[in-house]
Amino acid sequence: MKKILLQNKQFLLYCVIGASGVTLDFGIYSLLVKTRLLDYQAANAVGYSSGTLLSFILNARYNFRVTDKILLRLISFFSIAFLGWLVSAGLLLLLIGRFGFDKYLSKFATLIVVVLLQYNLNRLLSFRKAS
């Protein structure tokens, strides 16, 4: 078990950091939807952007430990996040708009798909060690 944890340390830390970003994302989304300040798609964009910025800062500093090319890495991270947001928005449109599923459970379901997608792209692109 210890060997498996050590082999997957970066992914596990990415998930822990991601959980903080997801918590912020979901909290902002829920607040904006519950108070009806924004519709679910706009609330998704605001929450998602906030969680993404927090995740970038924590991953750059504590997980991938990169200090070079921060602006370029941030642009890459947000580009991948935008792709993830498009996937999230499409899934929300399908789950809520087409099938009428619960807004909160649907949001949670999209997070699982997006985390796997973004981890792999960020590991390969945004936080790749400079050669």
Image (cartoon, grey):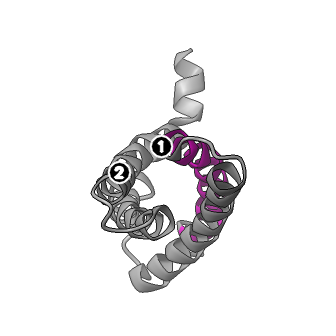
Judge from the rendering whether residue 5 lies leftward or rightward of residue 113; answer left or right: left
The residue singled out by tag 1 in the image is 104
The circle drawn on residue 125 is none
- Above/below status of 68 relative to 120: below
Q: Nearer the viewer, residue 80 or 4?
A: 80
The reply to whether the magenta stretch includes residue 51 is no
Q: Main secondary structure of the magenta part?
A: helix
The amino acid type found where label 1 is placed reads Tyr
Judge from the rendering whether residue 1 lies leftward or rightward of residue 34; answer left or right: right
The circle drawn on residue 30 is 2
Q: Are marks 1 and 2 in contact (CB under 8 Å)?
A: yes
Disc 2, SS: helix
Residue 57 spot, x, y in % from top left: 33, 65
The amino acid type found where label 2 is placed reads Ser
The reply to whether the magenta stretch includes residue 111 is yes
Residue 41 spot, x, y in % from top left: 51, 66
Residue 7 appears in which quarter of the rendering?
Answer: top right
Q: Residue, x 53% and y 66% (percent of image)?
A: 127
Q: Nearer the viewer, residue 10 or 32?
A: 32
In the image, which residues are magenta? 104-126
Q: Residues within 10 Å of mark 1 (few under 14, many from 20)?
A: some
Disc 1, SS: helix
Q: Nearer the viewer, residue 50 or 76?
A: 50
Residue 101 spot, x, y in % from top left: 62, 42
Residue 102 spot, x, y in % from top left: 54, 41
Q: Residues within 10 Å of mark 2 (few under 14, many from 20)?
A: some
Residue at the far top in the pictured view: 1
Query: Which tag, 1 or 2, sits closer to the chain's start?
Result: 2
Q: Residue, x 59% and y 54% (percent of image)?
A: 119
